[in-house]
Image: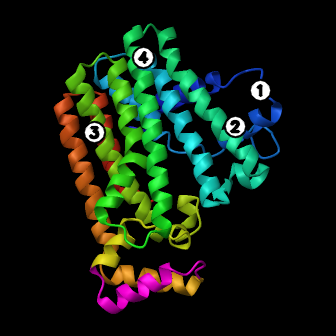
């Protein structure tokens, strides 16, 4: 039922994204890279319908607009903006992580090289900021358009700060659970919170309700990222679109790993630290790490943390006093995102 209810939103989001990409003026290579990453063309430049991701952020934006009493179509430029900004971060993240695949296909940098992939990401960043200004074309008052642009820009800076912290963690010997939570609050939760705030803003909500929607999104973002951490270790490659145990091979200090470092028996903790100091891990060594995580219940701890974040998100949603049918859709999405396996 949820999928059926969201289908109109997804179709409208796709149409808005296509409309926001410049129809002319860009070099064909740049257009090809952008349309490939967004799932509209294959690597040879032929029209295709490829995995474009969950579209989580723009859907939340539109639903929060509707839940606030607005016409969700008015918020489409903001929804496109958050999705374009998100995809800018993905292209750059893949470069920094040297990820060869995303969404079951080669990444932009793997096909066209690092330099051109940086250009593609930069272009999406610029187009995202153009898109949010398109709210004025939908009759949104100027002061709310300005507030929306400020919200998007603030989220972008927080994401970059979170990515800096995440990369630092890879070589940092001691990372606390609080350090981790602060990092994901910026890298992941900030944009999801901004998406919800943008929807409420366009929907005409007052300051307190906008803040409640933003908190809903931020808490949901925390839970979403923790589930990503679980899937980055235990997820199946054919479901996630990334190699199995990819986060361990990349030495990412995610929640399950940090929990194990703090709670595993001394010998296991020492073994874990020794393995994490190795520049390259073998498949057997990754298996050994997973065995240590399993022994101390790291996956169960992470899943419980994700559910706690979801519960906090739903409490904030209740405070926002959302209208139906968007309320039920937001509630169902929160449950689905935390219980997912891909």
In three-dimensional space, the C-alpha distance between marks 2 and 3, rounded to whole angstroms, equals 31 Å
The reply to whether discs 2 and 1 touch (Cβ–Cβ < 8 Å) is yes
Quarter where residue 106 is shown: bottom right
Q: Nearer the viewer, residue 46 or 286?
A: 286
The residue beneath circle 3 is 216
Classify the position of the N terminus by image quarter. top left
In three-dimensional space, the C-alpha distance between marks 4 and 2, rounded to whole angstroms, equals 27 Å
Extreme residue toward the bottom, this view: 267
**Total number of numbered labels?**
4
In the image, residue 250 above or below residue 161? below
- Choose the circle earlier in sequence order: 4 or 2: 2
Of tags 4 and 3, which is closer to the observer?
4
Picture disc at residue 26: 1
In three-dimensional space, the C-alpha distance between marks 2 and 1, rounded to whole angstroms, equals 11 Å
- Choose the circle earlier in sequence order: 4 or 3: 4
Image coordinates of residue 58 in percent, x first then y, are 46, 33
In three-dimensional space, the C-alpha distance between marks 1 and 4, rounded to whole angstroms, equals 27 Å
Element at label 3: helix
In the image, residue 211 above or below residue 237? above
The residue beneath circle 4 is 146
Of tags 1 and 4, which is closer to the observer?
4
In three-dimensional space, the C-alpha distance between marks 3 and 1, rounded to whole angstroms, equals 38 Å
Element at label 1: loop
Element at label 4: helix
Q: Residues within 10 Å of mark 1 (few under 14, many from 20)?
A: few
Span colored in magenta? 263-281
- Choose the circle earlier in sequence order: 3 or 1: 1
The reply to whether discs 1 and 4 touch (Cβ–Cβ < 8 Å) is no
The residue beneath circle 2 is 34
């Amino acid at each position: 039922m949820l999928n059926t209810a969201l289908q109109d939103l997804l179709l409208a989001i796709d149409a808005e994204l296509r409309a926001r990409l410049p129809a002319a003026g860009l070099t064909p290579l740049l257009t090809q890279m952008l349309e490939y990453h967004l799932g509209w063309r294959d690597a040879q430049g032929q029209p295709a319908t490829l995995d474009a991701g969950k579209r989580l952020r723009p859907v939340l934006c539109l639903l929060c607009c509707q839940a606030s009493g607005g016409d969700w179509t008015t918020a489409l430029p903001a929804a496109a903006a958050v999705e374009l900004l998100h995809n800018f971060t993905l292209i750059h993240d893949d470069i920094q992580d040297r990820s060869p695949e995303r969404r079951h296909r080669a990444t932009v940098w793997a096909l066209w090289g690092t330099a051109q992939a940086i250009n593609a990401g930069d272009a999406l960043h610029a187009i995202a900021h153009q898109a949010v200004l398109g709210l004025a074309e939908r009759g949104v008052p100027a002061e709310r358009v300005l507030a929306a642009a400020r919200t998007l820009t603030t989220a972008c800076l927080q994401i970059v700060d979170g990515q800096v912290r995440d990369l630092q963690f890879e070589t940092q010997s001691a990372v606390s659970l609080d350090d981790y939570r602060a990092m994901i609050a910026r890298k992941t939760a900030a944009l999801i919170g901004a998406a919800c705030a943008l929807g409420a803003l366009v929907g005409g909500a007052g300051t307190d309700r906008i803040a409640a929607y933003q908190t809903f999104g931020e808490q949901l973002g925390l839970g979403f990222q923790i589930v990503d951490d679980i899937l980055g270790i235990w997820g199946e490659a054919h479901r996630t679109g990334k190699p199995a145990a990819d986060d361990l091979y990349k030495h990412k200090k995610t929640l399950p790993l940090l929990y194990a470092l703090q709670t595993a028996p001394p010998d296991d903790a020492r073994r874990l630290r020794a393995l994490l100091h190795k520049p390259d891990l073998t498949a057997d060594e990754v298996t050994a790490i997973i065995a240590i995580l399993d022994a101390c219940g790291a996956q169960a701890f992470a899943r419980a943390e994700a559910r706690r974040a979801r519960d906090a998100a739903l409490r904030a949603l209740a405070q926002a006093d959302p209208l139906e049918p968007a309320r039920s859709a937001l509630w169902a999405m929160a449950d689905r995102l935390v219980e997912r396996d891909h």
